[in-house]
Amino acid sequence: LLNGLTDHITFVNDKLVHLNQLPETEVNDYIQNHDLDHEELKEVENKLHLLRTNLTELASLPLDKEEDISASKTKSVAITIEFDNLNIELDKFRFCRKLPLLYDLKKIIDLLEEYNNLVAEKIEIYKKIEDKEQTQLVDDCVLAIELRRYHISAEKFNLVKDDNKINDIVNRVYSEDGAYFLLDFGHNIKDLKRTYLLYKALFNKLHNDKERSKNVSWHYFKYLALLKSIMGELLDQPVIDSDLKSKAVVLLKSVKGDKVNLGVKLLTNEVVKNGTRSVEFLKRPLIFDYEVVGEICYKTMLDTHEEHLNDLKNTLNLVFTELSETYEGNALHFGQFIKYLETKLKGSVFERSLQLDLVGVKEKLPGIVRNILYAEKVCIKQDGLDKYLKQVGDIYTYLVKSYRVYIDSQRSEQEERWQLIHVHGDEYIIKNLLHDYSLDVDVTTLHKRGEKISNHKVMTTNNKQQSNIWKIKVNNDYAFFKNTENNEYLFASLEFTIGDAATNNFIGELSKAYQWNILDCTNLPLRGGPP
């Protein structure tokens, strides 16, 4: 304090010396300017008073209706502009030591303190308005979901700033039909993180529902719908970041775990019941995840094989019969389900006691499915054409980062031999056996070398990345290959790609160019040599 006082005395003395050195006319001008500064202080004081009045009026406005909130926000915008303008005017008073000697420093300090107090009050009032607005947005979002106006509900939800409000929305909408409404609502949310948070909140609600044991079937199908949404709206999205994808995988695992437990209860009921059995509830899950169906069957074996061996065997045979029927293109999934069970049962007590005819079931699978699942080597041929997918032959592997992939007539060469390596679900790595390079796509550049359409170039590489993974979709006796990196389909056309393999979105006029037969070439001899 003493040091500050000494500085101030020095400042005053310097100012007096300066005044004594000025001519009389300049001293008069100086005093006049000082008087003007005093008037400016009064003007600031008046503006502060007006701001307080406006804030008081804003705080007293009703916030019961949407139009009330809108009016308060409009007024708050105008008040914010007043605060900003006054703050600029106050800047010069904040450096009061540089102002004329006769300034009332205490007055300046009081005005600055008054301004800071008003700023604090403004923040509190604005927060109250925003909280009310956020509550109104959540109410509007819930109402729109219940009315199935999902586009409107998504628009409202995008304006909700607090992610924790998602739990509030789920709790309010959740009901027998509300779970489906929430999932339909989730399809309209553009933010993947918020979509994930919605699905996580819905899972927690389902998982903690005390009525689950009383409504097993109801919850079973809710879990199925949630599983489908997580896969389609999150994991199948190419733009999802790795961290969020990891969280979605963990969530999906939890959903599957609960769903399997519910499925075991339903299947066990069919095993032990007297009368006609029904396993229809396993058909739809098979479309999305064959492992879930496999786990339901396997865990039901664990629970029932000792006391209900014959009933269990009859029920499983019924499962094989009903699931083998064509249902929404599930032929590949049924084959994967059989292979999954075959692997789980191999060498186990169930294999000996149940004596299920899995070999007979496998023989009834469509040829293309058997080739995908069991063939050691395959040839990939365009459906209805004598054109095979090939990789350019070259012995200098260590010098080449990628090889051209194209279609040509069959020559029984190693360039035509491929191996399908299962990754997960319908996803496979397609490896050419000449150099063990895998089918890949350049997702960064468009391939336009003389083609009539733009597309992405396909080649083989020794990379191990997302673009090396392809999703196989079986349709009757041919398949589509969809790249998991760019979500485009593999095709080749002499007219449009000069025979080179490429990916593009499905084009109707080129439908044949996207259709591929998968043939078992394991024992097919190579030209001029052994198989």
Image (cartoon, rainbow, N blue to C red):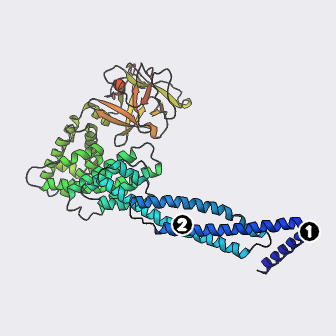
CA gap, disc 2 to disc 1? Answer: 48 Å
Report if residue 9 is visible in the image: yes
Mark seen at residue 256: none
Quarter the N terminus occupies = bottom right
Quadrant where the image shows the C terminus: top left
The residue to which callout 2 is attached is: 54
Q: Is residue 119 visible?
A: no
Taking the image as shown, residue 331 lies to the left or right of residue 490, namely: left
Residue pictured at 79% horizontal, 73% vertical? 102
Q: Position of residue 244 (x, y in %)?
A: 44, 51
Q: Which residue is mark 1?
A: 21
Query: In the image as oriented, which residue stretches furthest toward the bottom?
Result: 2
In the image, residue 391 sits, relative to residue 145, either above or below, namely above
> How would you rate the neighbour count of disc 2 (Cα within 10 Å): few for under 14, some for 14-19, many for 20 or more?
some
Give the vertical position of 205 relative to 109 (above or below): above
Residue in the foreground of this view, choosing between 246 and 362: 246
Q: Are marks 2 and 1 in contact (CB under 8 Å)?
A: no
Q: Residues within 10 Å of mark 1 (few under 14, many from 20)?
A: few
Q: Residue 157 placed where, x, y %?
A: 40, 54
Say what secondary structure mark 1 lies in.
helix
Name the residue at 32% across, 53% down: 145
187 on left or right of 120: left
Above or below residue 517? Residue 277 is: below
| Residue at the left extreme, as displayed | 275
Q: Hey, what amino acid is under mark 2?
A: Asn
